[in-house]
Image (spheres, rainbow, N blue to C red):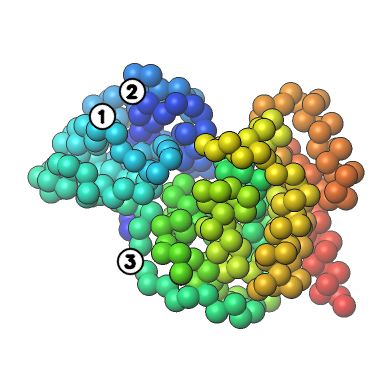
C-alpha cells in the first residue's frame, strides 16, 4: 500500500478534538505531509492548519484526502460519503482507517474507477496471521497501556522511539492503529484482526530480533474498557513486553464513550502484570506517561511529582516535557539485567 503525499485531512463534522486524533497524529509527526484541513459545518475540531475546500486542496498540490476522524463503530455518515465522492471526482485518492471499507460505500467504488483514483482502507490487510504461540522470542519489547482510550499511547510510543534513537539505541516503532500506520508507513491495525489471531498478529509485528533491539509497540484500548479490553489483552499476550508504560489523562472521571469509572494507575499496573505474565513472567512497569494538556504547567508538574513519589517510577508528559526520564529508567533496569 503506497499512499501518496501530501494530504488534505478531512475532519468532517467531528464533535471534538479527540475525535480528530488521527489528523492530529499525522500533523504532529508528519507536518510536511499536511497541506490543509477540510471541515464541514458544525465541526468541533481544529488541528491548526489551513482550512481548504477540496478544490483548494487540489490546487495546492494534495494527492490524497485522508479521513482524519475516529468515531464509535467506524461509521460513515451519508454526508461524509458525498465529500469522498467529490474528492475522487476532483482527482484525489482517498485513505481511511475506519472500520467500514470505502468500497462498501454507495457510489465510491464507481467514482474511483471512473476517475482512475485509489482507495486505501488501511485498517485492512491481506496478511494472514497464525494464532499466538506464546513462545519467548529474542529481542526486547515495550508496550504502552492505558487507563482509557485516547490517553496518549501512540504519542508516548513515538516519543520513546525518538528519544531512544537519539541515544543510539536499536529501536523501532511498531504501529497497531490506523494513525500509526499513516505516520510510520507500516504496521497492522490490530482491532481489525479476527479475535483468534490478535496475539499472532502481535507476534508477527514484533518478531524475533537482535538481543539488544527494542520494539516500541503502540498500545490499544484498555484492559478496563468494556468495549475494547479483548483487543488490549490479545495485544498484551502477543507482544510479550519486557516493559510497559502506563498512559493516563488526569481529568477524566469515566472512560470514553461509556459510563464506567476510570481505573487507578495502581489497578492498571497490577492487572497488566497479572495478564502479561502469561507470556512474559518478567514483565515490569518502567514509567507513567501523563497526557497533561488540560493542566497548566505548575499543576502538571506537581501532579507528576506526586505520582512519581507514590509509584516509585519516572513520570512525564513525553510530548510536553520529553521522554527522557522513562528512557533513563529503561536503560538503568535493562543494563542491570544484562550485567547479571
Q: Which mark is residue 219?
A: none
Q: Can you say which quadrant of the picture contains the N terminus?
A: bottom left
Q: Can you say which quadrant of the picture contains the C terminus?
A: bottom right
Q: Give the residue drawn at x 79%, y 67%.
A: 334
Q: Give the residue drawn at x 59%, y 77%.
A: 134
Q: Is residue 5 visible?
A: no
Q: Circle 3 is placed at which residue position?
A: 126
Q: Residues within 10 Å of mark 2 (few under 14, many from 20)?
A: some
Q: Earlier in the sequence, mark 1 or mark 3?
A: 1
Q: Is residue 118 above or below residue 53?
A: below
In the foreground, 278 or 66: 278
Q: Is residue 119 visible?
A: yes
Cβ atoms under marks 1 and 2 closer than 8 Å: yes
In the foreground, 111 or 57: 111
Label 3 to label 2: alpha-carbon separation: 33 Å
Q: Please name which of the two marks, 1 or 2, marks the residue nearer to the observer.
A: 1
Secondary-structure class at tag 2: loop
Q: Is residue 273 left or right of residue 78?
A: right
Q: Circle 2 is placed at which residue position?
A: 40
Amino acid at each position: 500500500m503506497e499512499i501518496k503525499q501530501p494530504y488534505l485531512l478531512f475532519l468532517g463534522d467531528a464533535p471534538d478534538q479527540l475525535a480528530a486524533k488521527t489528523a492530529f497524529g499525522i500533523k504532529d509527526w508528519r507536518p510536511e505531509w499536511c497541506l490543509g484541513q477540510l471541515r464541514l459545518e458544525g465541526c468541533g475540531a481544529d488541528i491548526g492548519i489551513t482550512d481548504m475546500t477540496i478544490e483548494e486542496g487540489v490546487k495546492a498540490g494534495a494527492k490524497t484526502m485522508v479521513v482524519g476522524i475516529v468515531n464509535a463503530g467506524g461509521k460513515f455518515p451519508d454526508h461524509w460519503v458525498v465529500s469522498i465522492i467529490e474528492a475522487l471526482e476532483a482527482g484525489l485518492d482517498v485513505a481511511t482507517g475506519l472500520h467500514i471499507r470505502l468500497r462498501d460505500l454507495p457510489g465510491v467504488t464507481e467514482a474511483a474507477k471512473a476517475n482512475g483514483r485509489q482507495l486505501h482502507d488501511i485498517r485492512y490487510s491481506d496478511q494472514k496471521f497464525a494464532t499466538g504461540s506464546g513462545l519467548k522470542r529474542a529481542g526486547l519489547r515495550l508496550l504502552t497501556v492505558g487507563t482509557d482510550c485516547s490517553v496518549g499511547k501512540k504519542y508516548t510510543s513515538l516519543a520513546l522511539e525518538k528519544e531512544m534513537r537519539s541515544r543510539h539505541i536499536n529501536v523501532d516503532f511498531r504501529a497497531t492503529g490506523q494513525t500509526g500506520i499513516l505516520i510510520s508507513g507500516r504496521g497492522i491495525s490490530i482491532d481489525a484482526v479476527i479475535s483468534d489471531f490478535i496475539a499472532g498478529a502481535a507476534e508477527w509485528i514484533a518478531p524475533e530480533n537482535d538481543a539488544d533491539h527494542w520494539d516500541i509497540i503502540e498500545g490499544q484500548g484498555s484492559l478496563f474498557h468494556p468495549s475494547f479490553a479483548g483487543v488490549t489483552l490479545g495485544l498484551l499476550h502477543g507482544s510479550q513486553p519486557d516493559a510497559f508504560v502506563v498512559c493516563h489523562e488526569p481529568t477524566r472521571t469515566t472512560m470514553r464513550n461509556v459510563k464506567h469509572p476510570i481505573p487507578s494507575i495502581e489497578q492498571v499496573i497490577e492487572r497488566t502484570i497479572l495478564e502479561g505474565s502469561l507470556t512474559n513472567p518478567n514483565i515490569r512497569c518502567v514509567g507513567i506517561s501523563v497526557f497533561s494538556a488540560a493542566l497548566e504547567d505548575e499543576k502538571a508538574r506537581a501532579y507528576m511529582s506526586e505520582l512519581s513519589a507514590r509509584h516509585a517510577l519516572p513520570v512525564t508528559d513525553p510530548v510536553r516535557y520529553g521522554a527522557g526520564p522513562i528512557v533513563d529508567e529503561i536503560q538503568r533496569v535493562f543494563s542491570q539485567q544484562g550485567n547479571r
